[in-house]
Image: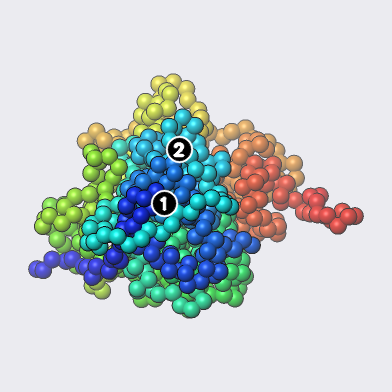
Amino acid sequence: MPPITTTTSTASTSKATTGTSTEGTTRPESPFLTLFAARVAAGPGAPALIHGDQVTTYKELDLWSGRLAALLMDRGVRPGGLVALAADRGPAAIAGVLAVLKAGAGFLGLDPAVPSRRQRRMIQETAPDCVLAEPGLDRFPTLDAPRVRLGPVPDGPVADAPAIDGPADEVDAADASRVFQVVYTSGTTGAPKGVRVGYASVLNRLEWMWRDHPFPQGAVMASHKSVSLVAAPWEMLGGLLKGVPTVVLDRDEVLDPALFADAIERQRITHLFLTPHIIGGLLDEVERRGRLAHQPVLVTNGADALQVETVLRFRRAFPATTLLNLYGMTETSSNVAAYDTAALDPGARRVPVGTPVAGASITVLDRFGRRLPPGAAGEVWISGPPLALGYVGAGEAGGFTAAADGTPAYRTGDRGRVLPTGDLEIVGRMDNQVKVRGYRVELEEIEATLRAAPGVTGAGACLTGGPDDPRLTAGVTADGEIDPAALRAFARDRLPDYMVPARVTVLPDLPLGPNGKLDRTSLGARLASVRQETRRGFTPADPVEATVARVWADLLGAAPADRADNFFESAGHSLLAVRLVNRLEHALGRRLTLRQILGSPTFAGIVERCRPAVIDDAGREAAS
């Protein structure tokens, strides 16, 4: 039987050039800069970035990033170097990325939502040459590295575009091995691991989308992902380098379905890269309104599995919009397969991830490395141009390996099969990796973090809940009395919020299998059977407090014990906050925004926001 291997042709690679920096050193010019310079020349006054009422033109963005690049180079950043980029979502983050590219370097994206302890570990492992940080986001006072403030630079030297100088083939080789960004993911060893993503693979990903899904006239791109994510370059540069205005959305504008729908209509956004949770929230809002006056052209789903029912709802809400289901991971520089959901049979059990794109080769193998026929499930292997350069640290190989013919490959750990249509379908995992709110999580890292807490002798973690509401839970053993709330606080200080268990239960022992390893199936059943300790609460003072307490308990599994309880410190997160908003509107008839919840996350603060408003004699709104 012939091998079951599906491939596409390799995307073309732009020729790079070499030139002279402001300090006279020869360095390669990135194809990204060539494309950006062409857009600046073609329309210097055209809108490049839109953020609220602020519009940044191509000329302004060119000067801004050029001045930042000059500062980076003055601080010693050289081609092939690395810059720690600490930035929130916004125009400054995109200007910072362009500045790093103009300096010939790569960047380590640092999301302010990630705990400082975790960021310090990333800094220690990568040893960046400089820190480019927005005010208040430089959390490394003891780091011996130069600093550049990431903000407006009204004057000063500008890093000029390099002149052409040198053989193109030599530059291509240098460009292929250069690091574009370092992205950290959850690791099985108990610590996060950094993936080195190359210039060539990022360009390859962009060129696939430009070729297969070209921007129509009047296109508008949306950018909302953190600079620390592997999918961010498409949002930050995909439209920008093609002359398409990019609308930069704040985090709460995307997570709050009402604000998100408003932004889509107001800015007439045509291209969106979303996750299933965000798509679901948007569909809820469209169904609440009846319809959206503006229909996007292309919506892509990534980071997590898309449900069949979500696709069917999307068709009803956006009949003229293409919805692509994408597949990939950080080690493959984002997406390597795509599926147009217009082809989905309404009776299907799963949404396929489609066929290879961006030059990827995808193969399904058994545990002995043999290729499997269509319909047989095995491990998914990927090779080709999308592969990242490897992990930070020479000793870390992980899933990077070689195929039988010696071709570099990545073992994804995903269980998949090729359908009769030729589409790849993902059916599960080979290991303990899970997905939570679009992020991949290695359960071993959570367990290692909990075991490091004082008094903890053992820890096990598992995923509970259905596909619409997956929740991390954990069980621990201890050598004495221990407070589960304190353990969650310990984890929250060391892990991103999506990795912090919603519930930690102290157990007399952890269930083990015949091989002496943790039995996660039995652990999940035992945790589900253990009733949470009932905390002494308070008596609601009025119907509003009673309603908020009931909704709070429904979402978090326990009622607030005190009016000062914080929603997010009680196992809440941003997506649950959106559900809180929707349920409170249904119960009380008062619409809150996610921004209001984030600003007053205590029980008392939420209650106050929910009280009916009255208008005083001066015409000002106040809570009654």
- Looking at the image, is mark 2 or mark 1 earlier in the sequence? 1
**For numbered disc 1, what is the local secondary structure?**
loop
Numbered disc total: 2
> Can you name the residue that lies furthest to the front here?
24
Asked which quadrant contains residue 538, the reply is top right
Q: Are marks 2 and 1 in contact (CB under 8 Å)?
A: no
Residue 466: image quadrant is bottom left
**Element carrying mark 2:** loop
- Name the amino acid, label 1: Thr
Q: Which mark is residue 169?
A: none
Q: Is residue 482 toward the left or the right of residue 536 in the image?
A: left
Q: Position of residue 107 (x, y in %)?
A: 40, 48
Residue at position x 23%, y 53% from top?
410
Q: Determine whether, in the image, residue 72 is placed left or right of residue 360.
A: right
Query: Which numbered circle lies on residue 146?
Result: 2
Label 2: few (<14), some (14–19) or many (≥20) C-alpha neighbours in 10 Å:
some
396 on left or right of 436: left
Q: Position of residue 581 (x, y in %)?
A: 62, 54
Disc 2 marks which amino acid?
Answer: Pro
**Label 1 CA crowd tier, 10 Å (few <14, some 14–19, many 20+):** some
Asked if residue 397 is positioned above or below residue 160 in the image, the reply reads above
Q: Is residue 519 above or below residue 585?
A: above
Query: Percent from the top left, x then y, of residue 368?
Result: 12, 52
Q: Where residue 401 sits in the image (x, y, percent)?
A: 19, 50
Please report the residue visible at 59 percent of the width from the left and 33 percent of the height from the top. 535
Residue of label 1: 22
Give the distance between the C-alpha atoms of the residues marked 2 and 1, in whole angstroms. 19 Å
